[in-house]
Image: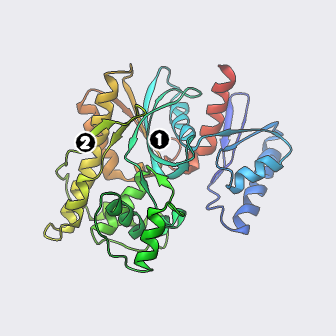
Amino acid sequence: VTVCLAWDDRAVVSPHIGDMGSPRSRAVFEQVIEDLQTLYAVRAARVVHDRHPDYSSTRWAQASGLSSMAVLHHHAHASALVGETAATGDWLVFAWDGTGLGDDASLWGGETLFGRPGRWQRLARLRPFRLPGGERAGRAPWRSAAALCWETGQDFELPQGDQDFLHQAWRQGINAPATSAAGRLFDAAASLAGVLQTASFEGQGPMYLEALATDAGSALELPLSQNSAGLWETDWSPLIAMLRDSGIPAARRASDFHASLARAIRHQAEQLAQQHAFKQVGLTGGVFQNARLSELACAELQDAGFVVSLPERLPCNDAAISFGQVVETLHRDME
């Protein structure tokens, strides 16, 4: 979490405050809000927040007494990138991260957005799956691995917990929300490749998986098709057999996984370019802190003739969300 104070043609983004899960971080959050306004002698007239109703920042905004506006998490990611570049025209932005609430009440995180700030349209995503345990999966990569296996009719031996109970709850959709999150897909890959089953912080499994990858890898072709709603979906299911194959060195599996997702990004962009006019492609969201994935995806996209941008002045993770919320709101006001 960060706070962004914006007025006239200026935007000041605070230092990282951290995870909002503790009373201490919430107190710091409120203090930073007050300190920024005092330092710049500017009093906020409006507050913009994430659409997720359970976030501490959302509750603070709604209780602030100020006029407030909600912005979708991944729209803010995309708008932060475009706002940083000050570019015009329509973009295709891959907003990949852990999870964030989408406008269909599912947990997004593997989204492909088209348009510009204030006018984003979701055109594609990664194939969704249901997460057993919901948000607990962020620190338990094995939960995401179980979800992928169960989603494709395969068995998965849980490293802990009651196998039958969890599977039954998952089948009935009890505390098993649907997600398209690339971050959870990386978690699953780390688990299936035997890299990490339980994490002490979110993103630990994907970090280990990235470190394990030693070369460019060989991309598996991941099917891309439109669902009944017209949304293009990349199907990750061909990755499962490769990731579970103990006869393949773990480093090779990690490399091939990264290469496959980079190729899938290219295929989505090429498909969508047949229907929509854009040349500029953006990569943002916490998953693109992964240098290997970012470099491979950039190479694939540039080889296909696209101009590619990643965040430079702001982080690609949630620290840029506050700025993106401001950009998104300004452009909505201008529409």
Numbered disc 1: secondary structure: loop
Query: What colour scheme does the image use?
Result: rainbow
Q: Toward which corner of the image does residue 45 lie, by quadrant?
A: top right
**Residue 219 in the figure: left or right of residue 73:** left
Residue placed under numbered mark 1 in the picture? 312
Q: Is residue 167 above or below residue 122?
A: below
Q: Toward which corner of the image does residue 73 lie, by quadrant?
A: top right
Residue placed under numbered mark 2 in the picture? 223
Farthest-out residue, left: 247
In x, y percent, where is residue 136?
Answer: 52, 67
Q: Residue at x 44, y 69 (%)?
A: 168
The answer to whether residue 206 is seen in the rendering is no
The answer to whether residue 103 is seen in the rendering is yes
* Label tally: 2
- Residue placed most toward the observer, 35 or 195: 195
Q: Local crowd at mark 2 within 10 Å, few (<14), some, or many (≥20)? A: few
**Residue 138 in the figure: left or right of residue 254:** right
- Residue placed most toward the observer, 155 or 180: 155
- Which quarter shows the C terminus? top right
Q: Is residue 133 above or below residue 44?
A: below
Q: Residue at x 38, y 73 (%)?
A: 197
Amino acid identity at mark 2 = Pro
Q: Residue at x 32, y 75 (%)?
A: 157
- Which quarter shows the N terminus? bottom right
Q: Local crowd at mark 1 within 10 Å, few (<14), some, or many (≥20)? A: few
In x, y percent, where is residue 302?
Answer: 27, 32
**Residue 180 in the figure: left or right of residue 73:** left
Amino acid identity at mark 1 = Glu
Cα distance between the residues tagged 1 and 2: 32 Å
Q: Residue at x 65, y 26 (%)?
A: 332
In x, y percent, where is residue 97?
Answer: 46, 50
